[in-house]
Amino acid sequence: MTELLSDASLQVAPWTTVAVTGRSGVGKSTLLRALGLFQPFDAGSYRLLGSDVSGLSDRACSALRAKHIGFVFQEFRLLPHLTATGNVETAAAIAGMPARTRRREAQRALELVGLSHRLRAGPRTLSGGEQQRVALARALVKRPSLILADEPTGALDDTTAAAVLDILRDAVAVSSAALVVVTHDPVVAQACDRQLRLHDGQLVPLLDHTVVGPTA
């Protein structure tokens, strides 16, 4: 089996955005799967929220993932039979949010991404940009500590992509989250606090203008 990650080291603080670039097939998605607790490590360690999670059981990983990690993909992956609110509510339920607060929190998340006028719309009636905003709301409804985004603007036009990036950065600032985004888009990469390139299994720093803590 080819080793995609070797001696790769990454530390991401709250309020920080990190872009990971690199050629297709070098292991960027593998890195996200590992950070999202979908793929175990053969060696090394992974600390999340101050605790070593590299040796946890699948069940424990699922519980941590559901509560603390938000995912955004290039493919929207919305449930076609549910409304925008219903899709976001489903994520809230998986995160263990009480039933009495799910609807309110789902609507709050949709308002955050600018879709307060589309709460009852189904995925088939939404534009590509609107579907990605629903996907963002789904990731943000649980107020995650870590947001992992895999080419979140890859299928969007420049204007919509810029709006999606602004939403992600605002979410990081408001909730003291950390964002790791895999991207081929130089605009997205340059908008992040740090840029890293994955090459030969290692993360090579390209740019770092991190300011730890909330900004005015």
Image (spheres, helix red, strand yellow):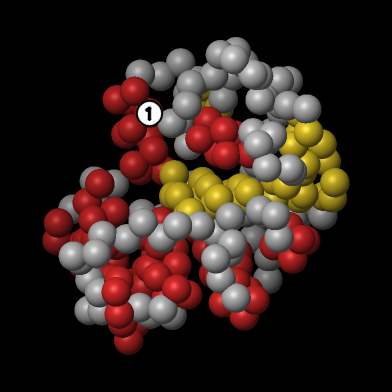
Location of residue 156 in the rendering, given as x and y in whole percent from the top left corner: 56, 71
Location of residue 151 in the rendering, given as x and y in whole percent from the top left corner: 58, 55
* Outermost residue, bottom side: 117
Foreground residue among 182 and 62: 182
What's the residue at 47%, 75% (across, down)? 129
Q: Please state, as top left, top right, bottom left or bottom right, where the N terminus lies in the image.
A: top right
What's the residue at 41%, 56% (across, down)? 139
Q: In the image, is residue 124 above or below residue 23?
A: below
Can residue 35 be seen at all in this image of the molecule? no
Structural crowding at the residue carrying mark 1, measured as other residues with C-alpha within 10 Å and reported as few (<14), some (14–19) or many (≥20)? some
What's the residue at 73%, 20% (across, down)? 7
Q: Amino acid at mark 1?
A: Cys
Dividing the picture into quarters, in which one does residue 203 lie? top right
SS for callout 1: helix
Residue carrying label 1: 61
Foreground residue among 94 and 176: 94
Q: In the image, is residue 37 above or below residue 112?
A: above
Foreground residue among 215 and 79: 79
